[in-house]
Image (cartoon, grey):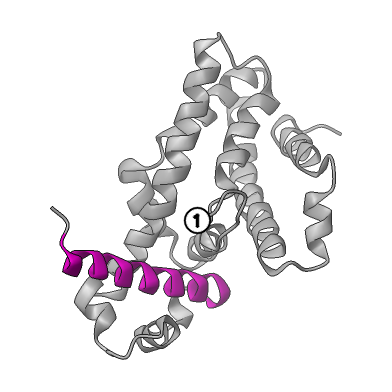
């Protein structure tokens, strides 16, 4: 049974996580102190982060899981539906499963958040930590997508395809982080991402990375 105290605790945890994620997205995990996170949270108790999360790394790990769980569930649901009707039949169909679940991560429908930028920065700063958290549980949808890509691109030599999948992963994370930033800050670049056909062009570009089209 949830008590009023536990509800207040959950709300405080969420406030800290939101502030931390946005700071991490802007300056990277190692560029933000626990004191700055508490200050950005608007909390008066300087020990709040330690009380709720113990360490900054524990907070980072929880933030990784929050978004990864949602994206992974969306990807697996989409793949279940596609496989249930005998697919996927085309590479772009699989690429769509990589892309679309990583959009609209905010609390309101159609709202972007700072998660992808946070993850993109962490991948550059502390890839070992990111991999340790994701590989343990929240990466199954991504791996299912890669398995389908390997099947649909089976004509490409294995070593070559392996390199292209690395290029795909790096490019996708960077592109989606740029998109998230543009939509979140409502800059002129927002028009680029909201223009008709923009996301379809993204899928075509990712397909070209995999297939090596010239």
The quadrant of the image that shows the C terminus is top right
Q: Residue furthest top?
A: 86
x 73%, y 36%: residue: 203
Q: Which residue is mark 1?
A: 107
- 119 to 74, vertically: above or below: below
x 81%, y 62%: residue: 189
- 143 to 39, vertically: above or below: above
199 sits left or right of 196 in the view: left
Image quadrant in which you'd find residue 152:
top right
Task: Looking at the picture, tell me which residue is in the foreground, 207 or 196.
Answer: 196
Q: Residue furthest front?
A: 4
Q: Is residue 143 visible?
A: no
**Residue 28 on image: x %, y %:** 51, 74
38 sits left or right of 204 in the view: left
Image quadrant in which you'd find residue 202:
top right
x 65%, y 25%: residue: 93
Q: Is residue 182 visible?
A: yes
- Figure label count: 1
Judge whether residue 44 is colored magenta.
Answer: no
Range of residues picked out in magenta: 3-27
106 sits left or right of 59 in the view: right
- 149 to 170, vertically: above or below: above
**Residue 4 on image: x %, y %:** 19, 66
**Residue 126 on image: x %, y %:** 43, 65
**Residue 40 on image: x %, y %:** 45, 84
- 157 to 85, vertically: above or below: below
85 sits left or right of 35 in the view: right
Image quadrant in which you'd find residue 72:
top left
Under tag 1, what secondary structure?
A: loop
Task: Looking at the picture, tell me which residue is in the foreground, 26 or 15.
Answer: 15
Judge whether residue 20 is colored magenta.
Answer: yes
**Dominant secondary structure (helix, strand or loop) of the stretch shown in magenta:** helix
């Amino acid at each position: 049974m949830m008590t009023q105290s536990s509800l207040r605790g959950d709300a405080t945890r969420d406030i800290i996580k939101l502030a931390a994620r946005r700071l991490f997205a802007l300056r990277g995990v190692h560029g933000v102190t626990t004191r700055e996170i508490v200050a950005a949270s608007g909390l008066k108790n300087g020990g709040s982060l330690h009380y709720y999360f113990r360490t900054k790394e524990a907070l980072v790990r929880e933030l990784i899981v929050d978004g990864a769980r949602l994206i992974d569930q969306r990807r697996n649901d989409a793949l279940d539906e596609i496989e249930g009707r005998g697919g996927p039949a085309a590479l772009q169909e699989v690429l769509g499963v990589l892309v679309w679940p990583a959009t609209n991560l905010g609390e309101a429908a159609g709202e972007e958040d700072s998660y992808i930028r946070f993850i993109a920065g962490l991948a550059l700063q502390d890839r070992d930590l990111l991999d340790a958290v994701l590989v343990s549980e929240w990466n199954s949808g991504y791996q299912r997508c890669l398995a389908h890509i390997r099947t649909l691109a089976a004509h490409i030599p294995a070593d070559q395809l392996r390199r292209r999948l690395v290029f795909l992963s790096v490019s996708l994370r960077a592109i989606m982080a740029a998109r998230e930033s543009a939509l979140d800050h409502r800059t002129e670049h927002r028009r680029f991402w909201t223009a008709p056909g923009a996301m379809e062009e993204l899928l075509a570009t990712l397909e070209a990375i995999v297939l090596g089209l010239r």
